[in-house]
Amino acid sequence: MKIKTPTRNMSIRLAAVAATLAAGAGCASDPNYGNMTPDAGPGTDTGTPSNNPVPPPAPVMAAGVRWVGRVDVTSNPDQPRFAWSGTGFVARFNGTSLAAQLSVSGASEIFKAVVDGTPQAAFTAPSGQAMYMLASGLTAGVHTVEVYRQTEGPQGETRLTGLTVGDGALMDPPAGPDRLIEVIGDSITCGYGDLGTLADSDCYPTESHWDTYEAIAGRALGAEVSTIAASGRGIIRNYGGDTSGTMPMLYDRTITNVGGIAWDFHVEPQAVIINLGTNDISNGKGDPGDAFRDTYITLLQTIRGEYPHTYIVCIIAPLLNGGDLSTISGHIRDAVAARNAAGDSNVEFFSSIPAQTSDKYACQYHPNVAENMMMADLLVAELKSKLGW
């Protein structure tokens, strides 16, 4: 990437500077199922490691920034694109301000900037391309800015098309942490409506990945988090009962709505958390049966094939209760037991997260921030115990 001699407002057009280094309580129905490109999804992996990933940090570096989560830098290296909840980038610069030119494909997308470690108020970017001030009025010197998507992937993708540094120049981004957690889930994991109230009719405007259990846990553990989640999705069937675009089908995608651009799984997280099953049974659909267990086993095999050493934590929380919770928990226990019997001891069913109480309801009964914090506390303790963190 060419960088001109700094001027008062030096605009940096993006180029790749490097490739990869080394009606009951249930999830919301997603109106954008129709935007999903058909994809067969992962095959029936036997669980034999097929990949040789490296431990973190092993970030994708492109456009002068370090990327967090999955990012497509191959389709158009000059305009990296990202979509999954919590994906984003980290930039370092010497100057007084930083602005980003973003291109948004959905109706609107929400982002959160963190300036020198201090979270800023989230901002909403409407469809189209525009420049957004991420940090301004800073003391002249070296600063770090992080930017994370709060809106989930099915709502559209984002392209980073430009960076402007005020009174200075972009610098090499800081190295990432040596801890990585991947989380696979549905609307609960996306943070769907977690800043809203039960009376809200639209939950996307109050969606905040920053306030999800996995993001909170990641910050507490000093770990980066890569979230692969979409509202309304299940293991074998979705909230509406349809069977297209389930999470096992989407798991290998770099961009949520785009099939055919598979993630390379180049870096191995120390832990993977799976929080799926709510949509397979909620809304009065009844027991999904043995097919749920068998597909769950296949997902565990697929993950193990990509990540030979990762510790896998399976949860189902916090919306189900009663018979539905017992049914899905039983299937997950059976799937984990099958993997344990096959010789995979690094997978567990963690059942210590209680069902959500009514005082923790946010939009459409989804967990509010307090519930997410409680879930995070329990998962932090479990990961510390299992990983020695």
Image (tube, rainbow, N blue to C red):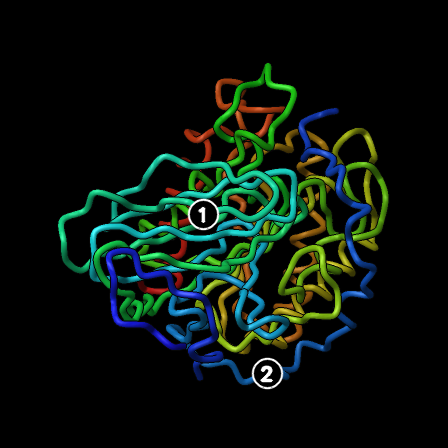
Viewer-nearest residue: 276 or 176 = 176
Viewer-nearest residue: 281 or 79 = 79
Q: Quadrant of residue 304?
A: bottom right
Viewer-nearest residue: 194 or 159 = 159
Q: Earlier in the sequence, mark 1 or mark 2?
A: 2
Residue 156 versus residue 345 in the image, above or below:
above
Q: Give x and y (percent) for residue 41.
A: 77, 65
For badge 2, the amino acid type reads: Asn
Q: Residue at x 48, y 78 (%)?
A: 20
Q: Quadrant of residue 21?
A: bottom left
Side of 148 relative to 120 (left or right): right
Circle 1 Cα neighbour tier, 10 Å, few/some/many (<14 / 14–19 / ≥20): some
Image quadrant where one finds the C terminus: bottom left
Q: How many marks?
A: 2
Q: Which residue is mark 1?
A: 131
Identity of the residue furthest to the top in this view? 199
Tag shown at residue 51: 2
Viewer-nearest residue: 234 or 209 = 209
